Image (cartoon, helix red, strand yellow):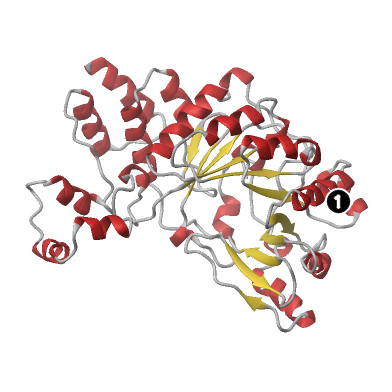
Amino acid sequence: MASHASRYCRLLDRHWTVTPFRKLFVQRSNGNSQRPYSSATYKENQLELGHPTLASTNFAASTKTRSKQERLKDHSLPFSAFLTDNFGRRHSYLRISLTEKCNLRCQYCMPEEGVKLTPRGQLLSTSEILTLARLFVQEGVDKIRLTGGEPLIRPDVLDIIAELRKLEGLKTIAVTTNGINLARLLPKLKDAGLDLINISLDSLVPAKFEFIVRRKGFHKVMEGIDKAVEMGYNPVKVNCVVMRGLNEDELLDFVALTEKKPLEVRFIEYMPFDGNKWNFKKMVSYQEMLDRIRQHWSNVERLQTGQTDTAKIFQVPGFKGQVGFITSMSDHFCGSCNRLRITADGSLKVCLFGNSEVSLRDVLRSGASDEELLQIIGAAVGRKKKQHAGMFSISQMKNRPMILIGG
């Protein structure tokens, strides 16, 4: 058993050195079954377990007035401490990349020269994807989004969705797609259990669309959007990465799309990733976009959103749809982040803009138990920083191209 434990510690050493975690992990593997908790929920969980060493008078006094039922009601418990970081953020949203391949070549996502694809044997298999999904859902994840690459080119995407649908506790299955194959597949996707759709569309001008994505397909994407509306998806989210000198002149045209259709057009600030030639001058900030829209629709109203929603949502009164802004660069939302990502090759990324990863694939294939996987996941989540480094620092950092992360 000791050699079994040391094997997992060596896996951890490939990614970081965490002496306290290493010590705890070896204790766990040697028969000490005490479960680790993040600092955010440690005290309350240990009180619930009757831990004898909690001596904080103030904390004990504050909990005496609240019953176990009350704490459960406000979700202080039993959300997994493995998925709770040191700042109290509970990660209930998992994004899984199904493939590194794509049938488009978007400028902001893939380097012009392309990317070196991971050998097939090093990508997660279907069973590995489902094993990890099951584990995360058991620990409190209630939303899974399938990304890529282009997830809809994976041959077994329907089977994956159907199997995810069987997971007790999973409320929402979503997909982010470029829309090329959407109209054809959507009836089967809906039957399999797909709840939400995000469709990437960066221009309403066919020639400009082809320039941005380096491929044809504009009319197929529009057909996919219309099909999603026809089949009752509401809202159908349309993702538009706004780049100065390229498509910022189409802001009003995109907003106009929401007048008669239940769309949520989401304007995304241009973000730096390896190979996408990001620079500050190309980025159009949320405030600049909103000012332009208000010049035309001065009565546009901001809508209330959930605590962990990434988009700032607005609506022109009388319009069926709405518009949102993903302000990752100019006004980050790190403080309410509830998202984790698993890449197609099985690496866990706790921050989109961070370059630290841990290979869950390697741990799975070495024969780890669920508890051992959770120990490693919990250590990664515990290392998540309070916020990203800022757009100028991010632009200098080594990170994957977006296509190899999974949007």
Is residue 111 depicted above or below 258 in this figure? above
Q: Is residue 249 above or below residue 199?
A: below
Of 399 and 387, nearer the camera is: 387
Query: What percent of the width, then of the height, locates residue 395?
Result: 60, 53
Front-most of residues 52 and 227: 227
**Residue 149 showing in the rendered view:** no
- In which quadrant will I find the C terminus? top right
> Looking at the picture, how far across and down is residue 126, in whole percent?
57, 24
For label 1, the SS is helix
Q: Nearer the viewer, residue 36 or 356?
A: 36
**Seen from this angle, which residue lies furthest right?**
207
* Residue denoted by label 1: 209
> Total of numbered circles in the picture?
1
- Residue 154: x percent and y percent? 69, 28
- Pick the quarter of the image with the N terminus: top left
Instruction: Give the residue displayed 23% in from the left and 39% down from the top.
Output: 20
Locate residue 72: give its quadrant: bottom left
Three-letter amino acid code of the residue under disc 1: Phe
**Quadrant location of residue 122?**
top right
User: Where is residue 211 drawn, in percent x and y?
Assistant: 87, 49
Residue in view at x 26 percent, y 15 percent: 3
Whether residue 226 is visible to the viewer of this picture, yes or no, is yes
Q: Is residue 20 toward the left or the right of residue 158 in the image?
A: left
Question: Residue 320 or 326: which is nearer the viewer?
Answer: 320
282 in relation to 275, above or below: below
Residue at image location 68% in from the left, 58% down from the top: 235
Q: Which residue: 41% across, 53% down? A: 385
Q: Would residue 397 appear left or right of 109 to someone viewing this image?
A: left
> How dense is the environment of label 1, judged by Cα within 10 Å: few (below 14), some, or many (20 and up)?
many
Image quadrant in which you'd find residue 404: top right
Using the image, determine if residue 80 lies above or below residue 361: below
